[in-house]
């Protein structure tokens, strides 16, 4: 499930890039890779919330790339993390002085990298500006824009249908009783029949096509979205 946070990993060790990409995507990050600074500098760097750079790469080093990034006013606040085998104190001080937000020496643990990323996100203070995207396979909900897509085609949902789907998709596997759904979504209405929930669920299932079967009825308990 994507958290909307986009990361670019730049390292000439392709296997390492793929390992990082795999593990970071498990944490909900959207990750792209580049195997050289030259390749990375041709990309749209403005869309990323974090750049993770190796230092020793090809003609343009990670240090040189970081300098180029910091010279761009549109990128001067984009966080940069170095992941590198250059582990002397002087290397680290130099990396931080040219504008890096963190510096991790190889070898490192994935858990440490993830913890450092979360710390950078907290320090950057821009988490409120991140898009809140919930995805399940080809079903995507853009919470900030209140839009739902299947295979990038927008699906028209009513406000209540959208909120029900968000509740269930955001809490996959958790069963919500009708009373819980009413209290969380129909907050302003004085009196709403339980049948109203059933009608909205039925309409919602039809609108989201093949994913309608993921909304499961637990007889006597309520509804949940099952990941299967």
Image (cartoon, rainbow, N blue to C red):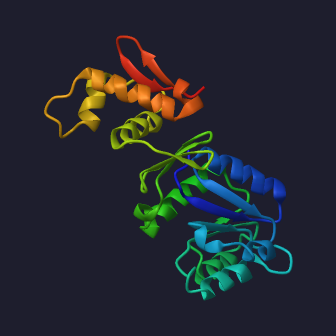
Q: Nearer the viewer, residue 104 or 143?
A: 143
Residue 199 point in image, percent of width and height: 35, 25
For this view, does 64 lie left or right of residue 69? right
For this view, does 52 lie left or right of residue 145? right
Q: Nearer the viewer, residue 114 or 156?
A: 156
Determine the residue located farthest toward the top in the rendered image: 220
Give the vertical position of 79 relative to 170 (above or below): below
Q: How many marks?
A: 0
Kindly tell me whether residue 171 is visible in this rendering.
yes
Determine the residue located farthest toward the left in the rendered image: 190
Residue at point 73% right, 83% down? 64
Kindly tell me whether residue 56 is visible in this rendering.
no
For this view, does 208 lie left or right of residue 111? left
Q: Say which quadrant the N terminus sits in.
A: top right
Residue at point 83% right, 61% down? 13
Q: Nearer the viewer, residue 44 or 122?
A: 44
Residue at point 62% right, 41% down? 138
Residue 27 point in image, percent of width and height: 58, 46
Q: Nearer the viewer, residue 166 or 15?
A: 166
For this view, does 37 lie left or right of residue 68? right
Residue 159 point in image, percent of width and height: 35, 43
Give the vertical position of 12 relative to 97 (above or below): above
Residue at point 71% right, 69% down? 87
Among the 4 quarters of the image, the one containing residue 83: bottom right
Q: Say which quadrant the C terminus sits in.
A: top right
Determine the residue located farthest toward the right in the rendered image: 58
Residue 97 point in image, percent of width and height: 59, 83
Among the 4 quarters of the image, the one containing residue 9: bottom right
């Amino acid at each position: 499930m994507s958290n909307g946070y986009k990361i670019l990993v730049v390292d000439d060790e392709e296997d390492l890039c793929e390992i990082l990409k795999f593990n970071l995507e498990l944490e909900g990050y959207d990750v792209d890779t580049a195997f050289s600074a030259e390749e990375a500098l041709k990309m749209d760097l403005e869309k990323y919330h974090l750049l993770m750079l190796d230092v020793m790469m090809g003609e343009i080093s990670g240090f040189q790339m970081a300098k180029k990034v910091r010279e761009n006013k549109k990128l001067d606040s984009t966080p940069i993390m170095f992941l590198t085998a250059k582990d002397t104190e002087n290397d680290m001080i130099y990396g931080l002085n040219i504008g890096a937000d963190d510096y991790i020496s190889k070898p490192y643990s994935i858990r440490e990298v993830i913890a450092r990323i979360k710390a950078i996100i907290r320090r950057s203070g821009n988490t409120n500006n991140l898009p809140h995207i919930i995805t399940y396979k080809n079903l995507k909900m853009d919470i900030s824009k209140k839009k739902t897509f299947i295979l990038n085609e927008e699906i028209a949902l009513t406000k209540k249908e959208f909120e029900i789907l968000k509740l269930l998709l955001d809490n996959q596997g958790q069963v919500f009783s009708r009373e819980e759904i009413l209290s969380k979504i129909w907050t302003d209405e004085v009196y709403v029949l339980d049948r109203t929930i059933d009608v909205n669920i039925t309409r919602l299932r039809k609108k989201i096509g093949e994913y309608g079967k993921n909304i499961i009825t637990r007889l006597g308990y309520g509804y949940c979205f099952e990941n299967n």
